[in-house]
Amino acid sequence: MLRLLAILLLLGGVVYCHAQDLRSGVGVEVFPHFSNRRLLAFDLSTTPQYRLDSLELAETALPSYSTGLTVHHRGNKVGVQASLYYSRVGYSSQRTRIPFGDPFAARFTDQQYRFLSQQITIPFAILFYQELSDKDDFFFLLGSGLSYNMKNQDIIERFEGDISEKEIKDSAFDYRRLNYSFQTGMGWEHRFNENWVMSVTPTFSIWLAGLYVDEPISRNLYQLGVRVGVRYDRWFE
């Protein structure tokens, strides 16, 4: 898959370098999204199916975000883009009753678990454009990305009526530091004038290697949201 994406990016670069109306720009992007995980069981003989089913029901999406800088080059029909993001991603559990024997059961009735990962990510993609009007373009995005996992936290929030209390601690698992992704999306680009451009891109991205280095059950994180960017372009003859 990575070879295919590299070939696509190379072809895109060749195409846009020979196109008319070349432009290059830098900008900022925000990517609010819901992040979640896909369960990975490496050895079904040691991982009972009921445990996987229980985790599947218990864990759910977490509102998250990414934000950062982007560099963009394009011709009439094809462009390439690379970004540098700070990302907060993870997943959550359903809110559940605290077991009777738990030491916190004397003070709280419910609890909710969240996993939060802070990462530096470098998404890059090729974009295929279709003109809608003099100032508007539709595009299809296909790409990959790299990430560096900086910090992982387990957050347990306990509740008693309107009162809540958070316990935050560093995760104890051996997490994978480097990862790579597949991303795709479709978007709209609007030019306000010769230089300023706004883009809106519903995007799906999934990290292809598991979170953990050596655990019987791991997770692939993925994100689904909308990237919104503002960019300053320069045109080249």
Image (cartoon, rainbow, N blue to C red):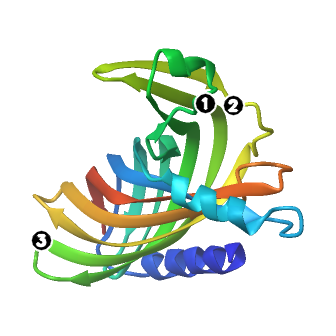
State the image quarter where residue 162 is shown. Answer: top left
Percent coordinates x, y for residue 54 in the rendering? 61, 58
Is the Cβ of the residue at disc 2 closer than 8 Å to that at disc 1?
yes
Secondary structure type for disc 2: loop
Neighbour tally class for label 3: few under 14, some 14-19, many 20 plus, Cα within 10 Å: few
Q: Which numbered disc, 3 or 1, marks the residue that appears first in the sequence?
A: 3
Give the percent coordinates (x, y) of residue 91. 51, 47
Q: Amino acid at mark 2?
A: Ser
Amino acid at pointer 1: Gln
Q: CA distance from mark 2 to mark 1?
A: 5 Å
Residue 30, placed above or below residue 23? above
Mark 3 lies on residue: 135
Q: Which residue is mark 1?
A: 153
Give the CA distance from mark 2 to mark 3: 48 Å
The amino acid on which the numbered mark 3 sits, given as a three-letter code, is Lys
Quick one: label 2 or label 3, which is nearer the N terminus? Answer: 3
In front: 56, or 139?
56
First of labels 2, 1 by sequence position: 1
Q: Residue at x 80, y 39 (%)?
A: 174
Q: Quadrant location of the C terminus?
A: bottom left
Q: Are the two marked residues, 3 and 1, in contact with CB atoms closer than 8 angstroms? A: no
Write the residue at 61% across / 75% down. 5
Q: Nearer the viewer, mark 3 or mark 1?
A: 1
Residue 152 image position (x, y, % from top left): 63, 33
Left or right: 12, with 237 as reference point: right
Going by the picture, which residue comes out furthest to the front? 100
Residue 129 drawn at (x, y percent) = 31, 80
User: Spatial distance from mark 3 to mark 1, Cα to Cα?
Assistant: 44 Å
Placement of 169 over or under 150, stated as above or below: above
Q: Within 10 Å of the Cα at label 1, are there few (<14), some (14-19), or many (20+) other Cα atoms?
A: some
Q: Which of 48/99 is in front?
A: 99
